[in-house]
Image (cartoon, helix red, strand yellow):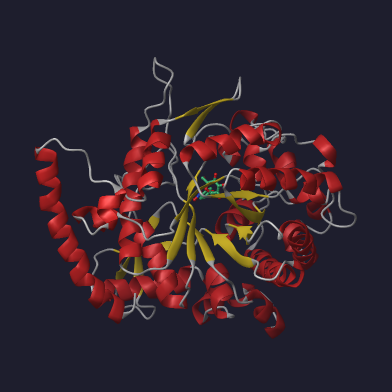
Amino acid sequence: MSKRLSRRTFGTVIGAAAVGASQASRLFAAGAAAPDAAAAAAGDASASRTFPPGFLWGTATAAYQVEGAATEDGRGPSVWDTFSHTPGKTNAGATGDVADDHYHRYKEDVQLMKSLGVKVYRFSIAWSRLFPTGKGAPNPKGIDFYNRLVDELLANGIQPFATLYHWDLPQALQDNGGGWENPDTAKAFGDYAGYVAEHLSDRVNHFFTINEFGAFVELGYRVGVHAPGVKLPPGRFNQTRHHCVLGHGLAVQAIRAKGKAGTKVGLAENMTICAPVIETDAHIKAAEEATRQVNAQYMTVIQEGKYTDLYLKNAGADAPKFTDAELKTISSPLDFVGINIYTPIYVRADGSPQGFAVVPHPKSFPRVASPWLFVGPEALYWGPRHVAKIWNVKEIYITENGCSSSDIPAADGLVYDTDRVMYLRNYLTQLQRATADGVPVKGYFCWSLMDNFEWADGYTNRFGLHYVDYDTQKRTPKLSAQFYKEVIAQSRVL
Ligand code: PNW
């Protein structure tokens, strides 16, 4: 944050924490209940754990992970249908054919949200329901589903936040020119985005263009473990990255052109979060520079309108080809930035020309059920703080954060996911610290409302606040749902 903010809040935070400790020990010694939100708002010691007024609590899902109904009402196949139906690509051959059957059970799922008390819900729209082959004539039954969902959410007091692309590229676009390898896909994405804005922006005020370049492009087009399962050589791969950010920019422009006045647009990116190894000025500065450089191919070019010199230099002959007009489109101004945050990397200052070094996680670094998910709660402090400080962003949402767990129902049928509660409590503590320091985080979407199709991991590695029995489609709130419900009710870390 700015010097002004950090100096002003420094004393407040330290002061509040000191009072908080003594107040808490008095309360618990007396066996009293924890202080509630009213007391906190009145300046009680617990205020240090409270979120700002109007903070938006939510949950998130994505179309292919929950909807099912893969061939219903004219939906065309996406790259994830093809990939998951290819033997050996997903754990135990799992597909999203049925998933959580949310397409038919969305009303029940809205009630789960209502019971949690969320004010906002982030879902994604399946491009191939609206345009079965990615472009051309729309399928009216496609948008009908999202009309029903949006109306149901609003009728229950929940604001819809819609993501336009959560990885389910229409298969026809992949077959015809290689999907995002082809700049025509960026153009088709812009057209689709305009169509959605035209039809939903009377009720949906917030749109995210693309979810996680950092996952689907890398895993789908370089590593090949996600759809479409391609392993491109570096030059073609960097060009594909470029087409994806270009698609984002074209979608921003289309939403502005076709959406109702006042429609807000941003993205939901899993940028790499650079936490300083120790919170000294030198390491913090190194972490800020690292943030720009390690996110050069996506977030930095979107925010700054150019690729960093270091990115272009390292890519050499494999650097993407681009025009100034494309860079301008890519950096079209946004209303907000969404960041999906699960885990940090650690950065230290060093004497190298780039000024930073990434410190690899030791083998013993704690993780949860997903092997990539290292537990580093301070990611939820440094992520939004870097975005606000480096790019002067005024409206930030945490568009995903969550924890995978083994989640085995106990004898009483409930899931006591104390690991997820521990994870959320520690991450939210760091998010609250960010808001207390003046970082403009406006809302938080917990991933996920319910267990769902976890991509190549299939139905293992559950991330839900609700347990889903995939044989019966029964949803049961886990301990973490009870925890999150209390957090929301009091808008403070518990
Ligand atoms: C995100 N990694 O995916 C996605 O946006 C969600 O659809 C997904 O369910 C959620 O996080 C949990 O995984 C990721 O390997 C998948 O680093 C893989 C990675 C990161 C994010």
Q: Quadrant of residue 354?
A: bottom left
Q: How many labels does the image show?
A: 0
Q: Is residue 186 left or right of residue 358?
A: right
In percent of width and height, residue 383 lies at 41, 63
Question: Viewer-proximal residue, 419 or 288?
Answer: 419
- In this image, 406 relative to 24: left or right? right
Residue reaching furthest to the right:
137
Rendering coords of residue 74 (x, y %): 85, 41
Instruction: Say which residue appears at 23% left-offset and 53% top-offset.
Output: 46
Q: Quadrant of residue 320?
A: bottom right
Residue 243, position in %: x, y? 70, 67
- In the rendered image, which quarter contains the C terminus? top left
Residue at 54% from the left image edge and 60% from the top image edge: 269
Residue 453 shows in the view: no
Residue 365 lies, in percent from the top left, at: 31, 47
- Would you say residue 42 is visible in this rendering? yes
Residue lying farthest to the bottom in this orientation = 324
Q: Viewer-proximal residue, 36 or 8?
A: 36
Specify the quadrant of the image occupied by residue 186.
bottom right
Q: Is 148 positioned to the left or the right of 422 in the image?
A: right
Q: Residue at x 59, y 60 (%)?
A: 213
Q: In which quarter of the image is the N terminus?
A: bottom left
